[in-house]
Image (spheres, helix red, strand yellow):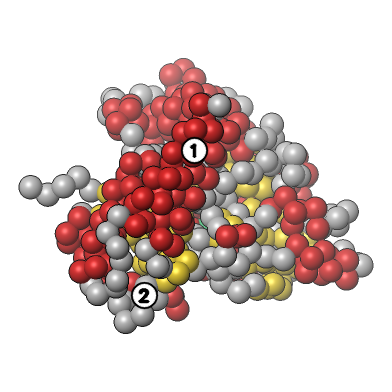
């Protein structure tokens, strides 16, 4: 018998049965009252998750489409843009802006770390003529398992009028983000991560300041045009045919999320991070990201000497039907990544750590069986203790 699959990717993530059942419903008229009720409910729900009262549009697209939507609406060709990058996805956001004609200045930080707010502060202060029109940043850098302290970086921009555009595709609802309170202008996220639904939707929240910029934007656009999106949203519709089944799923997932409460969701993800990191360290493994920058959503691990990360992943897949992510670009075979966001249970993490211990022993890395599991259990005991207080 093949055991149930453990999908520990940083997206797509497992889907709750409630969501799967909700999606298994007949089609409805996307220009009728039933769909209007759904779009109104989910728009309000995603805004709650972004902690914003601003504007929010949902597009049928992967996360990258959302990043492109942000660029084409809020950055004009020739605009100077500061793109802060700490990994693959920071590079991607910069590249999208470049391809749409922005003059992109990259500010790069070592992979595995977060951006230094002080350097951002200095750069913004230097820009006395306020040439920089937008700052691009990644909330959670999925390729390394590091996150950026968005609040501090926003504060570091001081009174500079540049818009801040945040790629929160994998971070939203796993790591704290307060769009309005932190004064973020645009936040993009995706369905297949902490939202617990399949890939295929992206969310783009933007404030009125961003909307004002959009009105003067010089890019050609049609599908991504937020003016059109807002016009239709006011009628309870989307400009083009929406993926209705995904909306059913989103509606149910948001109900689950709001029943649990956003603070509890974030705490649960913090507990996952602690369990995973403590357990892995007890196995003698080296973590790629320092504690200071460690993500709640994904943890990157260096493969121990002589054992490639991809051999570990293959053994985990073949023997335990457990799917871990590999390293991207230069990190291929050097690291593996455990996604722990969305619909993951504490006991899933314990099981995966147990499987990983056996895998490491089989591949020649000396681990005392149970060492990592025991430490993760200790973390879990503390978390349960705190919850009961
Ligand atoms: C931080 C981040 N940005 C952007 C993307 C791109 O999303 P997609 O693959 O859905 O286009 C991802 C996907 O993993 C991501 O983690």
Question: Which numbered disc, 1 or 2, marks the residue closer to the eye?
Answer: 1
Residue receiving disc 1: 383
Q: Nearer the viewer, residue 5 or 83?
A: 5
Above/below status of 101 relative to 254 = below
Q: Is residue 233 visible?
A: no
Residue for badge 2: 304
Most foreground residue, 383 or 81: 383
The disc at residue 89 is: none
The answer to which quarter of the image holds residue 245 is top left
Answer whether residue 366 is visible to the viewer in this image.
yes
> For the point 35% across and 24% down, which residue is it?
28
Q: How many circles with numbers are drawn on the protein? A: 2
Judge by depth and name the residue closer to the eye, 85 or 296: 296
State the residue at coordinates (56%, 72%). Answer: 111
Label 2 CB-ligand 1 distance < 8 A:
no
Establish if 296 lies above or below 78.
above
């Amino acid at each position: 018998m093949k055991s149930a699959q453990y999908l520990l990717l940083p997206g797509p993530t497992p889907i709750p049965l409630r969501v799967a059942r909700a999606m298994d419903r007949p089609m409805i008229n996307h220009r009728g009252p039933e769909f209007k009720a759904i779009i109104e409910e989910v728009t309000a729900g995603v805004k709650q998750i972004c902690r914003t009262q601003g504007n929010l549009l949902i597009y049928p697209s992967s996360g990258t489409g959302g990043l492109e939507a942000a660029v084409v609406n809020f950055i004009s060709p020739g605009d100077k843009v500061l793109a802060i990058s700490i990994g693959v996805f920071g590079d991607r956001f910069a590249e999208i802006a470049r391809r749409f004609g922005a003059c992109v200045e990259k500010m790069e930080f070592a992979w595995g770390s977060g951006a230094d707010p002080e350097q951002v502060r200095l750069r913004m202060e230097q820009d006395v003529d306020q040439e920089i029109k937008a700052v691009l940043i990644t909330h959670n850098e999925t390729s390394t398992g590091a996150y950026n302290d968005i609040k501090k970086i926003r504060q570091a921009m001081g009174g500079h009028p540049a818009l801040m555009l945040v790629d929160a595709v994998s971070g939203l609802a796993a790591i704290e983000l307060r769009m309005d309170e932190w004064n973020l202008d645009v936040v993009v996220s995706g369905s297949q991560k902490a939202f617990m639904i399949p890939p295929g939707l992206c969310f783009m929240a933007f404030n009125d300041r961003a909307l004002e910029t959009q009105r003067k934007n010089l890019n050609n656009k049609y599908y991504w045009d937020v003016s059109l999106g807002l016009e239709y949203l006011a009628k309870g519709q989307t400009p083009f045919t929406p993926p209705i089944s995904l909306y059913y799923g989103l509606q149910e997932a948001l109900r689950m999320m709001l029943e649990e409460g956003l603070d509890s969701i974030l705490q649960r993800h913090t507990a996952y991070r602690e369990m995973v990191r403590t357990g892995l360290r007890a196995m003698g493994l080296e973590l790629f990201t320092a504690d200071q920058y460690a993500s709640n959503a994904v943890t990157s691990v260096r493969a121990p000497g002589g054992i490639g990360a991809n051999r570990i992943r293959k053994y985990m897949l073949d023997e335990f039907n457990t799917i871990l992510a590999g390293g991207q670009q230069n990190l291929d075979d050097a690291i593996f990544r455990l996604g722990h966001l969305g619909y993951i249970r504490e006991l899933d993490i314990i099981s995966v750590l147990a499987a990983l211990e056996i895998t490491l022993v089989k591949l020649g890395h000396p681990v005392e069986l149970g060492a990592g599991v025991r430490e993760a259990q200790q973390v879990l005991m503390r978390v349960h203790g705190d919850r009961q207080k």
